[in-house]
Amino acid sequence: MTGVAKAVAHSNIALAKYWGKADRARNLTAVPSLSLTLATLRTVTSVRFDSSLPDDEFSLAGALMGGRPLLRVSKLLDNVRAQRGFDTRARVESVNDFPTAAGLASSASGFAALAMAATRAAGLETTPEQVSALARAASASAARSVFGGYVALAARGEHAERVASGEDFPLQMLIAVTAVGPKGTASTDGMTHTQRTSPYYAAWVEAAPALYAEVRRAVETADFDALGPALEHSALAMHASMLAARPALIYFAPATLRVMECVRAFRGRGGRAYFTMDAGPHVKVLVELGAAAELELELGKLEGVTEVLRTGAGPDAYWVDP
Ligand code: PMV
């Protein structure tokens, strides 16, 4: 055991969404999902097991964290410690190198990088599938960030699997960062609330597998015209279930709708671009390579859009020298 390791994992955005748990204790998802791993949004995490530490320590961008974030990190480390049969605490240092700090999901890349670094630091021999399962127990979307390109996680799946590489189906993703309001509901809490109170949750769980199959088929055949409508529908159907929760979960900001409208108008003029959004107000737009620069400019001019990030498909998570 080296005791120390460092890893990089890239964020991912689901094209077929998951929302809801089949098993809350084991963190297994109620529906299948399929995502694209992103090139430019990454988390770098180092883990150092140190017998002089009384407790685990976790810092994010240099700031020492406590409460729920620290508990989630410790829980993953406990899993690793149990597998390895030791009890040593660890110091975890994590940095997101996203061009913007606020409001972009970091749990996917964060827990994938942590699972990579922690297993290596503990001297565990693991397959990518085992690292993915470890990350999934902390945050289901993190299971997908262990792999690059297009990645699927089955309903109740233990680990993710690659469906296609980024080169197989080269597309661009634009992330329109919209004005950040008060912090929204965390995804796990939002899912529980939707499952408990939304009359449309059951309809979402029933509809999601067919949507996933449609997205997967389109990715496997590199068919953008089939993928686009299916990915938009997946995101909006998921949000419909949230909107019908009581009280409603509304992740839309005024600029969120402006971006959607702009993407639809772009299509009306013959452009090929489709949007998706997660548990936050930012909009992610999948667009063909040749049209990305033009749409990026247009989105950047919209009121309430503070920044537009542009990225292609990213790689598998990997280790670097600590
Ligand atoms: O597993 P979490 O807490 O990262 O939730 C992810 C939920 C969505 O981003 C909305 C959808 C998805 O499949 O990534």
Image (spheres, rainbow, N blue to C red):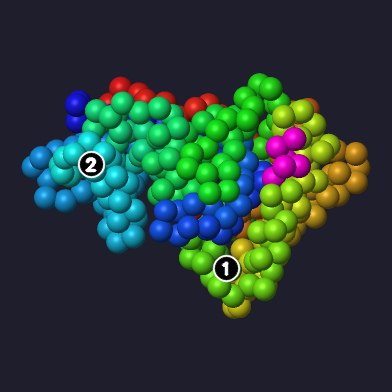
Determine the residue positioned at 70% across, 26% down. Answer: 170
- Amino acid at the residue labelled 1: Gln
State which region is magenta. 212-217
Seen in the picture, residue 241 relative to 246 is either above or below; the reply is: above
Seen in the picture, residue 234 relative to 285 is either above or below; the reply is: below
Residue 172 in view, yes or no: yes
| Quarter of the image where the C terminus is located | top left
Give 106 or 119, whichever is nearer the viewer.
119
Determine the residue positioned at 72% across, 29% down. Answer: 220
Give 249 or 178, whichever is nearer the viewer.
249
Q: Dot 1: within a 10 Å radius of its alpha carbon, few (fewer than 14), some, or many (20 or more) residues? A: many
User: Relative to 175, is 257 on the left or the right?
Assistant: right
User: Relative to 42, is 180 on the left or the right?
Assistant: right
Image location (x, y in percent) of residue 15: 67, 44
| Quarter of the image where the N terminus is located | top left
Seen in the picture, residue 109 relative to 177 is either above or below; the reply is: above
Image location (x, y in percent) of residue 98: 49, 40
Which residue in the rendered view is the most extreme toward the left? 52
Which quadrant holds residue 47?
Answer: top left
* Mark 2–mark 1 distance (CA, rounded to whole Å): 33 Å
Residue 259 in view, yes or no: no
Which residue in the protein does label 1 denote? 195
Determine the residue positioned at 69% across, 45% down. Answer: 212
Q: Secondary structure at mark 2?
A: helix
Which residue in the protein does label 2 denote? 81
Asked whether 141 falls inside the magenta stretch, the response is no
User: Relative to 141, is 218 on the left or the right?
Assistant: right
- Amino acid at the residue labelled 2: Arg
